[in-house]
Image (cartoon, coloured by chain):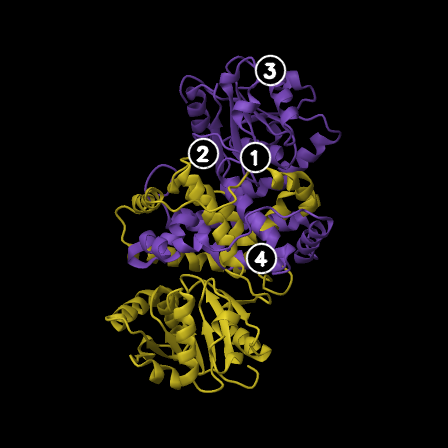
Chain colours: A purple, B yellow
Amino acid sequence: MGTRSIKQVTVVGTGVIGNGWAARFLSQGYDVIATDPAPGAEERMRLSVQRAWPALEKMGLAAGASKDRLRFEPDLAKAVAVADLIQENAPEREELKRRLLAEIDRHAKPDAIIASSTSGLMPSTLQADCIRPERVIVAHPFNPVYLIPLVEVVGGEKTAPEVVAVAEQFYQSIQMKPLVVSAEIEGHVADRLMEAIWREALHIVNDGIATTEEVDAAIIYGPGLRWALMGPFLTLHLAGGEQGMRHMLEQFGPALKLPWTKLEAPELTEDLRNQVIAGCERQTAGHSIAGLEVRRDSFLIELQRLLEKYWPGANLNGNI
Amino acid sequence: MGTRSIKQVTVVGTGVIGNGWAARFLSQGYDVIATDPAPGAEERMRLSVQRAWPALEKMGLAAGASKDRLRFEPDLAKAVAVADLIQENAPEREELKRRLLAEIDRHAKPDAIIASSTSGLMPSTLQADCIRPERVIVAHPFNPVYLIPLVEVVGGEKTAPEVVAVAEQFYQSIQMKPLVVSAEIEGHVADRLMEAIWREALHIVNDGIATTEEVDAAIIYGPGLRWALMGPFLTLHLAGGEQGMRHMLEQFGPALKLPWTKLEAPELTEDLRNQVIAGCERQTAGHSIAGLEVRRDSFLIELQRLLEKYWPGANLNGNI
């Protein structure tokens, strides 16, 4: 943990991501303070933590963990004043986040770490208005935050390397897999990959090639089964026979020049928007979102146990 | 099965994909004939089937299934003459596949179905030189073919609809999930999605943002966990809270205009090629491909059982 110890955590902004962070922190035995100016935020947050709790119990709670160790504090200054780490989850608008982070920076303890959950913005941009920019980082999680282990940790030009190292250890200590990304880039790493598949999926629907159900099926029963275990590179490495990736690049390298993807994002027209929404609602007809979340969560727990069982040495730095 | 019954299957071309088909057909109780002009093809194929067999035994063999019901026939004309369905798996070169399919067409029974495993070419192109183009389709599988259930079935301009219907039922009967794609398009559906992520992953490595290990980790511990269960659309639908996809499009629709992906494929330079190969070899240091395949296969079996357990109603046409 370096020279700092993180004991008190504050969550700023309590949408799906902020609530997910709160549930994860609580399950790991932390006291959590949360703040959000929206009416009804506290009630929604407590409901959200309650829904996540059975999954977290299955994953295993830390000693002393309790969902009652959550305190809601409407005043931002008070909410961040006592925190060792502040996790910011405001809407994804640059000017809003910059202003909010500067305000957090003014009220936080001098050595508190300020982490933004931004999916796309760069830490150098976000820390620009802070008095102590050296303790500002990006720590980008994935929904559901209380179960998905990946968190991308990125420092800005003015971030102290020690802060990145402490944050990495902290996220590891709460059962996450921090991926420290040394280069600042819009969308970090995972969202760039997700965005690529997302844009292509939107084109396929927009062009009438396949429905959302069919696109999802084309992933679920095909590449998705392999990516969960191996990611895009190892998947191809194992598809290349004994010669592995070498053979794949010889055989499929030339396909990079073929028109196999649409290379620009489609216009998100009213029509496309409606097709995509209707498709998803059709696929889940007769199920509540809450019910689907419970199924998803149970699956994710067992899938992660499977990953652990079959790819036990896998980690972000070492070999398989 | 319509008016036709598929009893005898012939596999033309015995690389990784052809051998995977042979193993799946055998495990489902079929007699399989295989042909390939390459020296040593028969030996490699039998070894490959033998390696796949323990996984297939775990999945469950059909009554009477045996890996000894494989016959190798070096003469193409003889190999295809008695088949009800011929699965072609030659290298991905248009002129080669066209010539080969025309030759298969000349020697096959008039009502035999000829299915090409092509990952990118369109059936209208492939059937152009055939005397009976109406029985030529694309049936594109995914590695490992003996375990991954997805197969994309596509007819060309001259394909009889009845042939597509019979093929769909046949692939279903051998425990696959056929996705009938009504529009012809380069790369069909799944490979377009894979190619999008693949191109972006290559850019990330090429630009020095992350290594192959880190890219794989960014999928395995993040989006990959969700895609295996839900595909890209439902994943976002469930990330949007109660409003689902509607909320996601409002919140992240504008990101389609941001430079979150590189929109053209990178030059596959010697340097990039080497980075990618070295990365994969580093990730698997100390493991044989065969050993990794065994682990992957066991995982895939359990993962598919998980999918069945948690998303039981999921299929290509209906609701979840």
Where residue B105 sits, quadrant-wise, is bottom left
The amino acid beneath tag 3 is: Ala
Circles 3 and 2 on the same chain: yes
The amino acid beneath tag 1 is: Ser
Question: Which residue shows up at 63% across the image and 56% down it?
Answer: A205
Q: Residues within 10 Å of mark 1 (few under 14, many from 20)?
A: many
Q: Earlier in the sequence, mark 4 or mark 1?
A: 1
The residue that label 2 is drawn on is: A178
The residue that label 4 is drawn on is: A215
Where residue B46 sits, quadrant-wise, is bottom left
C-alpha span from label 1 to label 2:
15 Å
C-alpha span from label 1 to label 3:
25 Å
Q: Residues within 10 Å of mark 3 (few under 14, many from 20)?
A: some
Q: Is residue A220 visible?
A: no
Q: In this picture, is B175 found above or below A294?
A: below
The residue that label 3 is drawn on is: A81
- Quadrant of the snapshot with the C terminus of chain A: top left
Residue A263: x and y in percent read 54, 48
Numbered badge on residue A119: 1
